[in-house]
Structure formats: structure tokens, C-alpha cells
Image (cartoon, grey):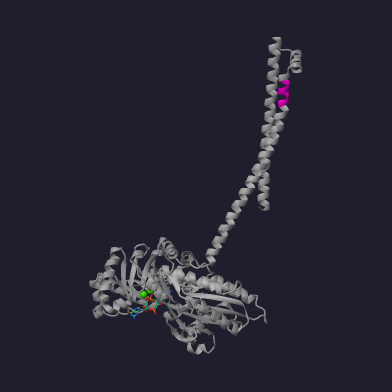
Amino acid sequence: MGAFGNDLMKHNLDLLRSKARKEAVQGVFIAAAAIMLATLMVCFFEQREITLSGLIQAQRTNLALWILNAMAFVFPLWGQYASRMIVYEAGAMVRHQTEELRVRNDQLEREKAFASTHDPITELPNRPLFYDRVEQAIRSYREGSGNLTLFLLELENLKEIQDTIGPTAVDIILRQVATRLLQSMSAQDSVARLDGFTFGILCSESTGKEQAEHTAHRLQKVMEHHFDVQRLKLSLHTSIGIVLFPEHGEDADTLVQKAGVAVFMAGKSHDGFAFYSPSFDEHSPRRLTLMGELRQAIERNHLQLHYQPKAAIPGGKIIGAEALVRWNHPKHGFVAPDEFIGLAERTRMIKPLTQWVMERAFNDCAQLRGQGHEITVSINLSAKDLHDPQLPDRIVGAMSKTAVQPEWFIFEITESSIIADPDRVLNVLERINGLGFGLSIDDFGTGYSSLAYLSKLPVQELKIDRSFVRGMLLGSKDGVIVRATVQLAHNLNLKVTAEGVENEETLELLRQCQCDIAQGYYLGKPQPLEQLTDRLGQLAARSEVNTG
Ligand code: C2E
Ligand code: CA
Ligand code: CA
């Protein structure tokens, strides 16, 4: 208990003690009154009158009065003693309960800290904690004390297993992988689950390349043995990327990035593992340099947001636009999001990237609305964003910088980002939806679709993936899928957007299917804000002419 707690308890016990003392004084008065009354009565019964000498006589001769007199001393003494005991016991009780509360509080704090730094499935440290440990190891590294070795282990075919036998089985495998890795490494090493199917291992007492190679073989060996899941015996293919500190990088970000490149090369190599080598840069120069430069690109405003219009199918009115990020790289020129979003997800860059996109989109939308264009702006969220319980707070934070309303925005999420950890993601989605933002399922039909969860999700829109939309014209089954999806969505009270509409014929087929919204090159390519504003301005002027 702290000094404040001690003072408070002492004060309370003093209060109890003085109360008990007051009760004892009252007891003495009552005893004195009883003695007086009894003496008067004895005097009256014996002498038939009350005189001073009669009272003295009664006091001198009556044995019962003597006992009563003694009680006047016994009661206060007993009272004092009892009050002391009560105060003492109360003190002990309070002390005990306070201690219990403190222990429980400490335990809750510990549980909270654990949840924010560990992966809920394997209970291994998560990515931020792993980076912290790498940085800590780098700080305490002393020259001549050997290398730090960082392994990145990727489970290559787990995605296929997930798509075939479902996410629950994958959780079981992940836990088994975690146990095997922990058992094969020593207690000083750090094993973490970085994301989906990637584990990180930090060896702080490594003597160099040869030992690292030895460890890689050992890791391969423990992963070779099949995994027992749902009475199936499943084999995993692993690729291991290895980097050494200080040889390959001087901070956690660089080391993990380079280990990512090494994993990529390991996947192609015969051995299944690879040390990072600068020669890999020739094979994946962009991949490597891009990872290092994305942070700068965000900070220096080298990213841009383009907007692709979304049009209502009957009428063709532009009712929204999807924000799509673009990177105009000083050396490599235009870099497509498909190339760097994945990289950002693998490193810690997706959080600042999404933050940048949100802030810019909020700003741009405020500008559009200010000019009288009442359109909604759709923003893409990655799986990583949805696993961050602070995302709703970050959205509120970004929103507070601009005068926008949540109903002006729709966040697009993909099915696969929900499947990885449905409970956690559902909680985040409900909070975002509760704030008033719209939610949409992107690329619908390409992931591990489950109709059961669709009705549980707080979404308002489905976006049918462009692969189905493109196939409609070919008379294949895609047309049937699109039609059925539209009907299903309408039954669930959801709006449907068809992506990748590239011509009038497709638009006509979608009209027949009663699809609500179209998006695609035919209606407009992703374009800078100014271009969209011009187009909206022209359309508004034309409609004024039409109606006027
Ligand atoms: P997406 O969300 O499915 O975005 C639609 C993609 O389809 C865009 O590619 C768009 O240019 C392209 N597209 C639009 N209409 C047509 C069409 O008629 N035909 C064809 N063939 N393609 C069309 P983009 O801009 O290259 O983006 C690719 C993906 O990158 C996006 O797919 C999205 O998953 C991701 N992405 C883009 N911006 C962001 C962002 O700000 N944050 C996150 N997390 N992801 C983003
Ligand atoms: Ca999208
Ligand atoms: Ca899409």
C-alpha cells in the first residue's frame, strides 16, 4: 500500500477508535445513572424515605449495589478492550481486501498489456513487440560479441489450406507451428508471429553464418513433419529468409525488409532458405528500394489519391468515387498500388499509409461537398488495418481535422481480411459502422465466401469482383453468378456495385440484372481530384440546362 493509502487507513481507524471511545463514555454515564437509581430505590425500600444518610447506608451495606458499582468500571474497560479489538480487525480486513484488489488490478493490467503485444491465436509476441525486441537487441549489441541473426519463416501453402479446409484448421496449424518453433529455439531467442503466415525469429547469441545455416536446417527439420488437423495429415512448405546484424542492416525495419527479400529468394531456391545478399537487388531492385522509400514517400507527399467514379445504373448519375492511391516515384516513375500495398502490409508502413489516405480523402471530400457535389467517397482498408483495435479511434482522429460527416464515406474491406480473425474484425467493423460510416465488401466472390457471416456483418454494399463482371459477356457462368449475387444482396438489403465495367454491353447486362451501381473504365478511369471536379461541374451544368 502506498503512503497515501496508509495515511487514509490510519485516519479511518482513528475515526473508528474515537467513535468507540464516545460509546464507552456514554456507557459510563448510563452505568452511573443506573447506580444512582438503584441506590435511591434501595434507600426508599429500606427506610421508606430518601435521605442522604439513608443513601450512604445503602451504599455501605448493600452487596448488590457493590456489584453494580463495580460494573461501572468493568463495562468501560470491556468497551475499550472490545473497541480496540474491532478496530484492529477492521484494519486487518481492509488491508487484506486492499491487497486482494491490488493483485487483481495488477493481473488485469498484465492481461491487457499481453493482449496488445501478443498474437491472440498463438500467444506469441506480435509484430510491434518483435520489432521492439530486435531494436533492444541492436541497442545492447556490442562489437565482437557475434552477430544477431534474424530469420523470417513463411508458410507458403497455408493460404491454400485455409481456402480448402477453413480458418479454424489453420488456427490449429498455427498453434502447432508456434509450439514447434519455440521448442527448437533456446529460451534467449525470440519467436514471434508477424502476420498471417509469417513468423520471425531473433537469435541474439549467434556466432555467424555457419551457425545460422545450422539453425535454418533445424527449423526446416521441425517443420518437415506433417501436421495433424481434423484427422488429416498436412504438410507445410516453408521458406526461410535470413539476415545478419550488423552486416545487412542497422535497424529493425531494414533487417525485416531484407529478410522479406531473402524469403522471396528462398521460395525460388532449391534449399528452401536463403541469406540476404545485395545481389538479390538485381532480381528485385524495386521491391527492395521501394520498401525503404515508402515512409519517405508518405512524409514527403509523393503519394497521390486518384478517384474513380461510381455511377448509378439507371440514370448514370455519378453518386460516388473510390479513392485509389498512386505513387509517383522520382526514379521508378509510376508505381502501381498492387506492388506497394502488399509491401506496406508486410512492414509497418500500412498504418501510416492508411492514415495518409484517410486524411487526404476526408480533405478532398470536404472540398467536393463545399462545391456542391454530393458524392460519397470510398476508401480501401487493408486486412492489417482491420486487425488494429485502435482503427476506429484513428478514423475519428483523422475526421476531427476536417469538417466532414461519416455518412459521406464508405470503407471497403475484403472477405479475406475478415476470415483471419472474425471476432476481432467484427468488433472493429461494428464500431466504425456505429460512428456512421458505410461499409462495403470489396472483390466479392474471390475470397473464402461464407454466406453465413455475410448476414452478420454490418455492411451496406457488395462490390462484385471485376473477374465475374468481365466474364458476363462471354456467356459463361459468370453472368449467372452476378445475377444471383445481386438478388442475394438485395434480399439482405445491400446495394451492389459491379467493378471493372469496360463497355456498354456489360453495362446493359448489369442493368438487366438490376445491379445498382457501376464502376469501371467505361464510366471513368481513376483520375486526379481536379479532373473529377471538372467532370462533376460539367455534368451539373448540363443537368441545369436539361432541367432548366
Ligand atoms: P480495388 O480496390 O479492387 O480497386 C480497383 C482496381 O481496379 C483499381 O486498380 C482500378 O484502377 C482498377 N480498375 C478500375 N476499373 C477497371 C476496369 O474497368 N478494368 C480493369 N481492368 N481495371 C479496373 P488500382 O488502382 O491499381 O488498385 C489496385 C488495388 O490496390 C485496389 O484494388 C486495392 O485493393 C489496392 N488499393 C488501391 N488504393 C488503396 C489504398 O488507398 N489503400 C489500400 N489499403 N489499398 C489500396
Ligand atoms: Ca476497392
Ligand atoms: Ca475491388
Query: Residue 160 at what x, y percent from top left?
Result: 40, 76
On screen, residue 75 versus residue 450, left or right, reads right
Query: Residue 364 at what x, y percent from top left?
Result: 42, 72
Query: Residue 95 at what x, y percent from top left?
Result: 64, 48
User: Residue 182 or 29: which is nearer the viewer?
Assistant: 182
Residue at x 56% of width, y 63% of height: 113
Query: Residue 244 at what x, y percent from top left?
Result: 59, 82
Q: Give yes or no for residue 104 being in the magenta stretch.
A: no
Residue at x 53% of width, y 72% of height: 192
Q: Main secondary structure of the magenta part?
A: helix
Residue 232 occupies quadrant: bottom left
Residue at x 70% of width, y 31% of height: 76
* Residue ranking furthest to the top: 48
User: Residue 314 or 88: which is nearer the viewer?
Assistant: 88
Q: Which residues are magenta?
A: 65-71
Q: Give yes or no for residue 69 being in the magenta stretch.
A: yes
Residue 229 to residue 24: above or below: below
Quadrant of the drawing holding the C terminus? bottom left
Q: Is residue 191 visible?
A: no
On screen, residue 2 versus residue 336, left or right, reads right
User: Residue 350 or 201: which is nearer the viewer?
Assistant: 201
On screen, residue 527 versus residue 264, left or right, reads left
Q: Is residue 449 visible?
A: yes
